[in-house]
Image (cartoon, helix red, strand yellow):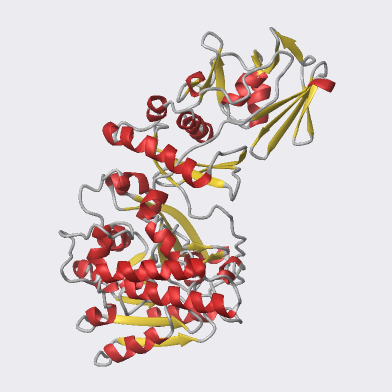
């Protein structure tokens, strides 16, 4: 479910949050003759080219090259020295010395640093290595030439173009598979959204590259007046931008691997769930030994979840994957479509209205079908486990997967009441917590009023997907009007197939009494089992005190006894 406290604001701002991007040029002091005080304009960047336009020992202008790579350059006139900062890298250069330092470590040069044509120069190879970039230098055009596989540098160059208002240049970084007219409309909105929500962006704080089965990713973070701004730019195999993702919060958690994580008992491999434009990268965790093994597909709750279902310092799905695999059950988890393909969804690339079917159901079924075709998996022993909203839509998944022969389903903290009414309950609960703690309540009270008004519109029978009220402002109206009035237990009442319903007794997002509703509604079914875990919160980890949601920042793991209960139920 949506995380507490900021739930309503996030829902209302969802479409805006899905459309973010950008950078800010970094200020720098002048060299002997002042250079521009901001980073090199985007017009001085050539993306996706061979990386060696000049030889590695050729001298290149330190400031021009470094600022084009997104670094901040400071000239110290008193000792004729230069400091270059890019993310976590700091380079110190002093005129006349035959060495530079990179994060405190000396790098010897063939000859002393000098000034040529009023610019400090360094060998291309030395400077590129020090900055951690793969880029050449075009002497004729005085431009940096970025290698096709330097995704972090391509990302920062794109954001420099966007920040500078060079929208045509920014658009040139994108794959031609995206509609150009839509990009032309979106990019100015993205630029304005970032400025409005974050203000001016400052220094580049961090750069990180990663790859999965679908995209090459570059995550870059910038300082702002409040929290850091972070964005992940996703590239296709040709070095062109295919998508991007901006998290709600860029603060990293401090996950700790569980004690039962034994890498000798499982192997993991990268897989692709689905196909085509919206294919998703995933991880298949296989037990070590002779199969075929039963397998479980893990289906996320609401929000743009990663494959681990990371929440603060908790990784619910990763814990379950390694824990179940160690007990002989394979697990498939994957990135959610609203995380991996958010921009294309915003651009309407789905070709249809976006509902929970596109958000969750279709990919869950694709994951089941992938497992049925996977060597080492028992095709008659495939289960689906849905957490939170993923459990709420399990009846839809069961209907959509009728031809796959599902062996059973597992519901983890699955709500039995409509999402919209649950959001009201969550907000009231958080308001009570604030009052008890003596904290200001004005914002929460305003959120509650807003939400109650929106829910009233949502539940008004005169409105529908084809007749949306103008005052509705909770995000995608089609999504909400499709999922409204969902009573999951009622939908599951007449279905068949083994089912295990698990609930935490310390859950403040899907309240523990939901288990009672599941039991009562499904009382006529003989193929369902239920279990309550008194100390477990919504992320399926134990917390000794009263859950508030703040404890998600504390490293914790899914209890081994909960994982064992699931494994025994599957292997029975």
Vertical comparison of 117 with 132: above or below = above
* Residue placed most toward the observer, 172 or 40: 40
Q: Position of residue 111 (x, y in %)?
A: 78, 14
* Residue placed most toward the observer, 78 or 457: 457
Residue 474 left/right relative to 250: left
Residue 208 left/right relative to 475: right
Vertical comparison of 532 with 181: above or below = below
Q: Total number of numbered labels?
A: 0
Q: Residue at x 55, y 75 (%)?
A: 434
Q: Residue at x 48, y 69 (%)?
A: 444
Q: Position of residue 57 (x, y in %)?
A: 66, 15
* Quarter in which the N terminus is drawn: bottom left
* Quarter in which the C terminus is drawn: bottom left
Q: Position of residue 204 (x, y in %)?
A: 60, 38
* Residue placed most toward the observer, 294 or 509: 509
Q: Residue at x 65, y 16 (%)?
A: 61
Q: Position of residue 43 (x, y in %)?
A: 48, 20
Residue 308 seen in this snapshot: yes
Residue 99 left/right relative to 447: right
- The quadrant in which residue 263 appears is bottom right
């Amino acid at each position: 479910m949506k995380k507490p406290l900021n739930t309503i604001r996030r829902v209302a701002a969802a479409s805006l949050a899905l459309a973010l991007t950008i950078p800010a040029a970094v200020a720098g002091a002048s060299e002997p003759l002042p250079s521009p005080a901001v980073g090199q304009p985007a017009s001085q960047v050539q993306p996706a080219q061979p990386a060696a336009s000049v030889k590695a020992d050729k001298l290149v202008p330190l400031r021009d090259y470094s600022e084009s790579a997104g670094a901040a350059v400071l000239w110290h006139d008193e000792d004729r020295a230069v400091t270059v900062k890019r993310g976590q890298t700091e380079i110190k250069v002093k005129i006349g010395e035959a060495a530079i330092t990179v994060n405190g470590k000396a790098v010897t040069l063939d000859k002393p640093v000098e000034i040529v044509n009023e610019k400090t120069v360094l060998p291309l190879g030395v400077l590129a290595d020090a900055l951690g970039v793969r880029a050449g230098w075009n002497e004729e055009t005085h431009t940096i030439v970025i290698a096709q596989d330097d995704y972090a540098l391509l990302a920062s160059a794109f954001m420099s173009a966007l920040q500078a208002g060079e929208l045509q240049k920014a658009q040139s970084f994108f794959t031609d598979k995206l509609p150009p007219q839509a990009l032309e409309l979106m990019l100015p909105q993205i630029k304005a959204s970032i400025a409005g929500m974050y203000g001016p962006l400052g220094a580049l704080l961090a750069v990180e590259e990663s790859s999965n089965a679908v995209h090459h990713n570059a995550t870059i973070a910038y300082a702002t007046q409040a929290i850091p701004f972070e964005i992940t730019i996703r590239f296709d195999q040709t070095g062109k931008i295919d998508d991007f993702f901006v998290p709600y919060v860029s603060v990293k958690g401090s996950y700790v691997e569980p004690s039962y994580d034994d890498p000798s008992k499982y192997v993991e491999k990268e897989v692709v769930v689905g196909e085509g434009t919206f294919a998703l990268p995933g991880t298949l965790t296989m037990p070590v030994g002779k199969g075929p093994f039963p397998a479980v597909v893990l289906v996320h709750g609401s929000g743009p979840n990663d494959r681990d279902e990371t929440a603060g310092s908790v990784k619910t799905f990763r814990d379950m994957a390694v824990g179940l695999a160690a007990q002989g059950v394979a697990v498939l988890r994957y990135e959610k479509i609203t995380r991996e393909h958010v921009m294309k969804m915003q651009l309407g690339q789905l070709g249809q209205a976006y509902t929970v079917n596109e958000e969750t159901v279709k990919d869950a079924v694709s994951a089941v079908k992938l497992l049925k075709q996977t060597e080492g998996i028992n095709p008659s022993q495939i289960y689906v486990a849905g957490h939170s909203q993923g459990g709420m839509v399990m009846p839809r998944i069961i209907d959509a997967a009728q031809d796959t022969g599902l062996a059973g389903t597992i519901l983890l903290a699955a709500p039995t009441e409509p999402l919209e009414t649950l959001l009201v309950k969550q907000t009231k609960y958080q308001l009570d917590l604030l009052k008890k703690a003596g904290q200001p309540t004005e914002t929460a009270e305003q959120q509650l009023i807003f939400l109650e008004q929106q829910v009233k519109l949502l539940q008004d029978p005169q409105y529908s997907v084809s007749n949306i009220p103008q005052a509705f402002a909770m995000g995608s109206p089609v999504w909400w009007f499709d999922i409204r009035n969902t009573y999951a237990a009622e939908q599951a009442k007449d279905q068949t197939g083994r089912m295990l319903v698990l609930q935490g007794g310390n859950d403040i997002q899907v309240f523990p009494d939901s288990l009672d509703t599941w039991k009562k509604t499904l009382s006529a079914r003989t193929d369902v089992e239920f279990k309550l875990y008194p100390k477990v919160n919504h992320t399926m980890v134990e917390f000794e005190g009263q859950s508030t949601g703040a404890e998600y920042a504390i490293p914790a793991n899914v209890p081994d006894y909960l994982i064992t209960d699931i494994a025994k139920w599957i292997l029975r």
